[in-house]
């Protein structure tokens, strides 16, 4: 029969000197003991008679038995110290459960017993347990006994596993909070802790559970943790406290055990709990509420680093005794949303290489693509650019953390702002090989007192981290979660509440990026603004195949006038060239090429159109590229794809966007170099892959590369048409090429209409070719002469082939 009625006694105040020392650490002093109990029973008989019967179970009888038992508790005569010098709270609670069940004749009882004067800094420490009559063995009829010791819990009893030790209203004044003012003034926090019953079976000589015996030390460690960490969020502190409290603690001295306790050759643990609940409240946080709080329950399984085998549990931050420097692989997350965001990311990588060489061996070996994302935690701020870099380093994790913070400082990060707020640069150590490390557990700090946790705890929830991590290491196994970045991203994006705010971008200038989308990337979200960009051609040459002009090549003002016209008509990029690369064109020296382009670049950059003009330098010569970039150009457009000696080094050093075009030979030989082993598409693909691999090996960053298959360069007329038709095959079938943004330049090319000798007359053919480029799905930029035409064409073509308008 279900016992649906409840008798309660709340906060019965008792008094005894038999407990462990009080908050002044005085033994055998009278202390208050507060008891609350709950009994599930039936009160129908008493209700029917409106009277208490002779054998009635009632709160008066229960209270008298409890008071009598506590009053008769004997002061321990043992020579123990501290918690061993008195009767443990859980032992008193167990005795009271027997009193209520066997003397007050209750069928069951739930008891909460607390000591309000056990700690100076907390309201109380206490225990909660529930027992029922059926869980005890009873004295035999042949040897009846009134002693409570005659009633023992059966081995099958399950309720002891649910016993709880608690600390309530632990008050601390600490530095906590995200706002700048909170980083200066201490404020009160209130901490409530619950600890599950130890599961190791160890019992001390006075009956205390061994794993609870060191509760004072656990509370002290929690208090010290608050002071040392100066947390930013309640969420962080409740989890880190859980980790700390679940960490077993060895007794500094031998503890006498009960004869019935299980034996062990391992060090005695005076603190060893399997599960804890931590709640932290912050009274000053909300103006019109008593306080907000965050509560978590964690078990050992939630902290693999605490209980992993020694080989993976921790990582020593002390260099090896042999002095050998071993290269370790690590992954660093980058983010920025202030100033020139593209430049910030590039500067971070360059500075990492430079300062890394000064502190040991730390070098960037690979970069992800670049991504743009909405701010995640404090949403009222500008969008972020994000990326991940793979590095090799001889630095140990804490020293690497110091290096990353030094780079942030060098690049101008303001550390006084609130966490997750706007920042020039942010460098996070995401993964360090298969190491699992939390220096809060080891007590280690870097030279500025910072702690470190690896793997980074934010990886699993951050799309802007997982996407670039998938670029670099899709199959790498997270050492704690045992999942790959690909699997973690899939889990995140498949959540019903997930909404992507991240898309891939490619840079155009120090402050400008453009989103793009690839159907072949299953994890790449669709970006709404993937319009095709217009690169307008401005030839400062007298002998260009389609628009050579002596005045434009020699008069900066004439060139500026044409550049402004392109910009007014919708050009996104002005591509300026000082040497014709048409088949058969006459070579000129670097000095002449520089003389033609640099004054124009300086003038355009200094003019009123500077803010909206992205300038590309069309050259294959490294000294011309360097001079143009120094004058203010943003992009290198190299028709040789980095083949000229020294060009890849300039691209890597300047860390600017680069267009790598496929070509063979030079203007005097390219028309004879149109034979491709294994066919056109396979041949061009293989040579473009080699071109990209050489650029990456030279230090050109992946996110800075734009590809151009080179229409009209070392291809016959028929081959150009075939290549245009087979663009998806060229790129999609190559794991090396398929993710790069693509520029296509077919404007006024001879193969479009060879019968038209005047290139300017190939206007309609160019229009058709531009539409075909957009339709291919492999075109982010079209390079054209007629800006107005191209802008109108791609606006329609984009709506047909790129937009998702009308699909909802």
Image (cartoon, helix red, strand yellow):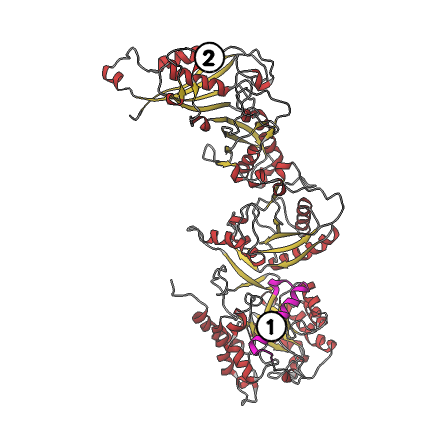
Give the tally of numbered discs: 2
Q: Is residue 702 magenta?
A: yes
**143 and 292: which one is in front?**
143
The answer to whether residue 784 is seen in the rendering is no
Q: Quadrant of the N terminus?
A: top left
Q: Position of residue 570 (x, y in %)?
A: 53, 71
State which quadrant residue 50 falls in: top left
- Disc 1 vs disc 2: which is toward the camera? 1
Q: Mark 2: which secondary structure? A: helix
The local crowd at label 1, few if under 14, some if 14 to 19, many if 20 or more residues have their Cα within 10 Å, is some
Q: Position of residue 480 (x, y in %)?
A: 56, 45
State which quadrant residue 750 falls in: bottom right
Q: Mark 1: which secondary structure? A: helix
Q: Is residue 693 above or below residue 26?
A: below
Q: Is residue 32 above or below residue 478?
A: above
The region drawn magenta spans: 676-704
Using the numbered discs, state the Cα–Cα distance from disc 1 to disc 2 in whole angstroms: 88 Å
Q: Which residue of the protein is positioned furthest toward the left in this rendering? A: 48
State which quadrant residue 365 falls in: bottom right
Q: Which mark is residue 686?
A: 1
Q: Which mark is residue 70?
A: 2
Q: Which mark is residue 124?
A: none
Q: Quadrant of the C terminus?
A: bottom left
The answer to whether residue 27 is seen in the rendering is yes
Magenta stretch: helix, strand or loop mostly: helix
Q: Position of residue 763 (x, y in %)?
A: 51, 83
């Amino acid at each position: 029969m279900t016992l649906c009625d409840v008798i309660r006694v709340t906060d019965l105040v008792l008094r005894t000197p038999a407990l462990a020392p009080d908050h002044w650490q005085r033994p055998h002093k009278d202390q208050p003991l507060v008891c609350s109990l709950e009994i599930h029973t039936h009160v129908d008989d008493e209700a029917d008679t409106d009277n208490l019967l002779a054998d009635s179970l009632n709160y008066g009888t229960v209270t008298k038995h409890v008071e009598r038992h506590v009053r008769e508790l004997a002061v321990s005569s043992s020579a123990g110290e501290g918690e061993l010098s008195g009767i443990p709270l859980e032992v008193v609670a167990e005795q009271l459960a027997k009193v209520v069940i066997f003397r007050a004749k209750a069928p069951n009882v739930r008891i909460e017993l607390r000591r309000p004067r056990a700690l100076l800094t907390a309201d109380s420490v206490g225990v909660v347990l529930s027992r029922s009559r059926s869980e005890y063995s009873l004295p035999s009829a042949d040897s009846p006994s009134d002693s409570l010791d005659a009633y023992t819990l059966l081995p099958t009893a399950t309720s002891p596993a649910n016993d709880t030790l608690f600390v309530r209203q632990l008050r601390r004044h600490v530095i906590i909070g995200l706002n700048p003012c909170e980083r200066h003034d201490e404020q009160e926090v209130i901490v409530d802790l619950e600890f599950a019953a130890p599961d190791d079976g160890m019992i001390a000589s006075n009956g205390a559970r061994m794993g609870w015996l060191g509760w004072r030390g656990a509370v002290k460690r929690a208090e010290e943790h608050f002071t040392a960490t100066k947390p930013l969020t309640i969420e962080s502190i409740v989890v880190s406290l859980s980790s700390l409290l679940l960490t077993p603690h060895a007794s500094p001295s031998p503890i006498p055990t009960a004869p019935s306790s299980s034996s062990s050759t391992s060090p005695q643990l005076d603190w060893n709990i399997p599960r804890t609940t931590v709640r932290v409240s912050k009274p000053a946080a909300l103006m019109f509420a008593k306080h907000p709080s965050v509560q978590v329950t964690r078990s050992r399984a939630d902290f693999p680093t605490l209980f992993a085998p020694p080989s993976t549990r921790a990582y020593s931050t002390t260099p090896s005794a042999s002095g050998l420097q071993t290269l370790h692989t690590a992954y660093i997350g980058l983010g920025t949303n202030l100033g020139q965001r593209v430049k910030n990311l590039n500067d971070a990588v360059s500075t990492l290489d430079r300062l890394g060489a000064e502190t040991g061996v730390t070098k960037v070996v690979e970069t992800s693509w670049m991504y743009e994302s909405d701010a995640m935690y404090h949403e009222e701020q500008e969008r972020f650019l994000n990326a991940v870099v793979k590095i090799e380093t001889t630095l140990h994790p804490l020293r690497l953390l110091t290096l990353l913070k030094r780079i942030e400082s060098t690049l101008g990060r303001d550390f006084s702002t609130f966490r997750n707020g706007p920042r020039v640069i942010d460098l996070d150590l995401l993964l360090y090989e298969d190491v699992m490390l939390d220096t809060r557990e080891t007590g280690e700090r870097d030279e500025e007192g910072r702690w470190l946790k690896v793997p980074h705890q934010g990886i699993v929830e951050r799309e802007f981290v997982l996407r670039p991590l998938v670029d670099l290491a899709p199959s790498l196994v997270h050492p704690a979660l045992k999942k790959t970045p690909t699997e973690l991203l899939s889990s995140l994006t498949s959540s019903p509440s997930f909404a992507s705010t991240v898309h891939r971008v490619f840079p155009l200038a120090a402050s400008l990026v453009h989103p793009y989308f690839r159907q072949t990337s299953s994890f790449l979200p669709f970006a709404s603004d993937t319009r095709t960009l217009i690169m307008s051609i401005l030839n400062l040459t007298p002998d260009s195949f389609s628009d050579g002009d002596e005045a434009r090549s020699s008069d900066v003002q004439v060139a500026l006038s044409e550049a402004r016209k392109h910009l007014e008509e919708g050009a996104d990029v002005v591509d300026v060239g000082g040497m014709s690369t048409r088949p058969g064109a006459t070579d000129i020296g670097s000095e002449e090429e520089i003389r033609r382009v640099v004054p124009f670049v300086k003038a355009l950059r200094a003019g009123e159109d500077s803010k909206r003009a992205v300038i590309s330098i069309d050259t294959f010569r490294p000294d011309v590229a360097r001079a143009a970039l120094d004058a203010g150009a943003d992009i290198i457009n190299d028709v040789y794809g980095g083949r000229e000696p020294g060009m890849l080094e300039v691209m890597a050093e300047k860390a600017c966007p680069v267009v790598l075009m496929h070509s063979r030979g030079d203007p005097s030989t390219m028309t004879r170099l149109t034979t491709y082993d294994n066919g056109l598409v396979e041949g061009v693909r293989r040579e473009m892959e080699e071109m990209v691999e050489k650029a990456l090996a030279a230090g050109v960053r992946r996110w800075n590369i734009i590809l151009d298959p080179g229409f009209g360069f070392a291809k016959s007329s028929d081959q150009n048409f075939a290549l245009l038709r087979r663009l998806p095959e060229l790129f999609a079938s190559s794991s090396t090429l398929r993710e790069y943004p693509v520029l296509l330049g077919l404007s006024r090319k001879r193969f479009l209409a060879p019968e038209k000798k005047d290139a300017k007359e190939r206007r309609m053919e160019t229009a058709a070719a531009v539409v075909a480029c957009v339709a291919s799905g492999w075109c982010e930029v079209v390079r054209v002469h007629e800006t107005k035409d191209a802008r109108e064409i791609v606006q329609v073509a984009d709506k047909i082939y790129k937009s998702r308008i009308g699909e909802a």
